[in-house]
Image (cartoon, helix red, strand yellow):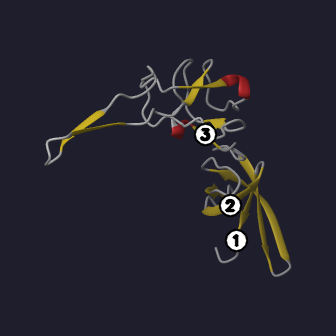
Amino acid sequence: MSNTMTRIFLACIVATGLIMTARAAAAQNVWHAVHSLAPGDIVHSEDVVSQPPSGRVRHAMSSDTPIVGLEVRRRIYAGYDIPENDLGPVLAVKASTIVTVRYKADGLSLQMQGRALEAGSVGDEIRVENPASLRTIRATVVGEGAVEVKSGQ
C-alpha cells in the first residue's frame, strides 16, 4: 500500500468465523497554492499545483475542478489547500461602485446611474441604490459595471 493512500481497515467477523478486510480508496488530489493569492487575484496555471490533501484545510477543492480564470475571494496562503468557497467567477460589479442601470420593456429603454450595494458576477442579482431617491432596487448583473432591471419591479 502506498503512503498516499488512506489506510482504513474494516474487519467484520462473519457468522462462519471468517474475517473480511476492506480498505478505502486513496483520497483524490486537491489544488494547492504555489504562492500566496490575495482577494481579487485571477488564478493562472502557474499559481496552483495538484497534490494530495495536506489536511490543513476543510473542504479543499478537488483538482478535477477547473479553477484557472476564477477570482480569489479570500486570502490563500502558499502551500495550503485551496478551499472550495475561496474562489468564484470574476466579479463584474464591485460593491460601492457606480453602475449603469438599464430598464427595457415594450420598446421603452431607460438608463441611469446607480450605486451597487453588493458585488456580483454576470447573472447574479444584486441590490442597487438610486442616488437621487435613495431607493434600493434589485438588478441582474449583465456585464462589467452594468446591471439590468426586469420589468415589474
Label 1 near label 2: C-beta < 8 Å? yes
Q: Residues within 10 Å of mark 2 (few under 14, many from 20)?
A: many
The quadrant in which residue 129 appears is: bottom right
Q: Residue furthest bottom?
A: 106
Residue displayed at 51% across by 26% down: 52
Residue denoted by label 3: 64
Q: In what element is the residue under mark 3?
A: loop
Q: CA distance from mark 3 to mark 2?
A: 30 Å
Residue denoted by label 1: 150
Looking at the picture, tell me which residue is in the foreground, 150 or 41.
41
Q: CA distance from mark 1 to mark 3?
A: 37 Å
The quadrant in which residue 127 appears is: bottom right
Residue denoted by label 2: 140
Residue 106: % across, % down: 81, 82
Which quarter of the rendering shows the N terminus?
A: top left
Work out whether mark 3 precedes mark 2 in sequence or the reverse, and give the earlier one: 3
Residue 145: % across, % down: 76, 49
Looking at the picture, tell me which residue is in the foreground, 131 or 6.
6
The quadrant in which residue 11 appears is: top left
